[in-house]
Image (cartoon, rainbow, N blue to C red):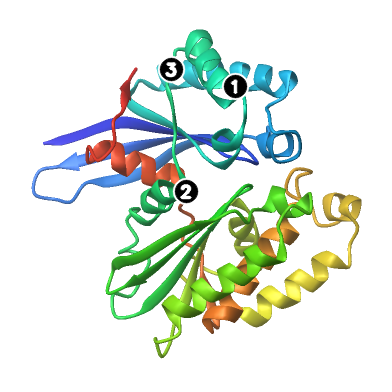
């Protein structure tokens, strides 16, 4: 007996807001399959408001209301049975974050769960990595966001330790990451990876997905530290405008991609990793699996 239901996740990040709709396929005697059906991304960039002014602007509050209502209608059209909306770094730190959360509920009927950095890291690490990783290897999982980056050490397919750091692309663009934060991250990575003989990095987030696509590598094949360094230097040789016109990057990607690469490169350098795997998964995937396996509270359409 085959059952296909649609689940959804709304990821309200510091750089963009995403709606992921997935088919959850159940067949007797077989493991459940999660297959992406639709992904909508809106670059509201809440972090640009919050990290500089401490609050979400009226303009971006209205954009949030419009976007959430659109997501609600899309979920209805897709006949989504369960969903969850999670907000991360920008909403956590915004002085008027709770007001925006309440306004979204009143306007669109969507309840937003503002999660802390450790919960974010745990949800991301709970995504099904088994089909992407070798259970005999050790990995440093790095999920780069606009306001924070989540790090997890995975060995024998299990998450050993996770930590969220306030180092993100939007913060870096606005020169809001102090030297101490980098030093703390360096110490944490070396402390938790230094005793392993060999380690690889797993990268998630829109920027590394774009870099992987540009590389032309087959899914499952890693990028090298050398390739990432070369591409980083190439990007820096172009102006913001040239990255859009000549490298065909979206305008909301053309600026954040460089600070994102800095984070991945430092993670590889400090852990001693020579390769980075890009399985194209992230917080939204983790939310859907958490909803399905009832490890987090969810909403019904």
Asked if marks 1 and 3 touch (Cβ < 8 Å), the reply is no
Residue nearest the observer in this picture, 81 or 110 = 110
Q: Which mark is residue 117?
A: 2
Q: Nearer the viewer, mark 1 or mark 3?
A: 1
Q: Is residue 2 visible?
A: yes
Percent position (x, y) of residue 28?
9, 43
Q: Name the residue at the front extreme.
A: 180
Q: Nearer the viewer, mark 2 or mark 3?
A: 2
Q: Which residue is mark 1?
A: 67
Q: Which residue is mark 3?
A: 77
Q: Which mark is residue 164?
A: none
Q: Residue at x 18, y 51 (%)?
A: 31
51 on left or right of 71: right
142 on left or right of 215: left
Cα–Cα gap, marks 2 and 1: 24 Å
Q: Earlier in the sequence, mark 1 or mark 3?
A: 1
**Secondary element at tag 2:** helix
Asked if marks 2 and 3 touch (Cβ < 8 Å), the reply is no
- Location of the C terminus by quadrant is top left
Cα–Cα gap, marks 1 and 3: 15 Å
Label 3 crowding class (10 Å Cα cut-off): few <14, some 14-19, many 20+?
A: few
Percent position (x, y) of residue 80?
35, 24
């Amino acid at each position: 007996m085959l059952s296909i239901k649609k689940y959804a996740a709304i990821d309200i990040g510091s750089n963009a807001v995403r709606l992921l709709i997935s088919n959850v396929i159940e067949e007797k005697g077989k493991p459940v399959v999660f297959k992406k059906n639709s992904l909508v991304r809106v670059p509201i960039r809440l972090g640009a408001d919050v990290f500089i002014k401490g609050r979400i602007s009226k303009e971006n509050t209205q954009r949030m209301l419009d976007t959430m209502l659109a997501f609600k209608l899309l979920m209805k059209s897709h006949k989504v049975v369960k969903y969850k909306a999670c907000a991360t770094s920008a909403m956590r730190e915004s002085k008027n974050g709770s007001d925006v959360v309440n306004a979204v509920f009143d306007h669109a009927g969507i309840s937003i769960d503002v999660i802390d950095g450790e919960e974010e890291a745990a949800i991301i690490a709970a995504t099904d990595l088994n089909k992407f990783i070798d259970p005999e290897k050790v990995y440093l999982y790095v999920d780069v966001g606009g306001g924070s980056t989540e790090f997890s050490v995975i060995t024998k397919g299990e998450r050993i330790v996770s930590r969220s750091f306030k180092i993100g692309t939007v913060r870096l663009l606005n020169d809001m990451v102090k030297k101490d934060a980098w030093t703390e991250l360096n110490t944490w990575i070396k402390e938790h990876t230094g005793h392993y003989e060999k380690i690889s990095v797993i990268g998630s987030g829109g920027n590394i997905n774009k870099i992987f696509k540009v590389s032309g590598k087959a899914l499952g094949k890693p990028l090298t530290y050398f390739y990432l360094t070369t591409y980083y230097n190439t990007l820096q040789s172009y102006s913001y405008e040239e990255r859009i016109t000549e490298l065909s990057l979206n305008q909301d990607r053309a600026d954040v991609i460089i600070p994102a690469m800095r984070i991945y490169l430092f993670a590889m350098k400090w852990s001693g990793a020579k390769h980075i795997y890009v399985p194209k998964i992230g917080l939204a995937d983790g939310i859907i699996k958490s909803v399905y396996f009832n490890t987090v509270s969810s909403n019904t359409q």
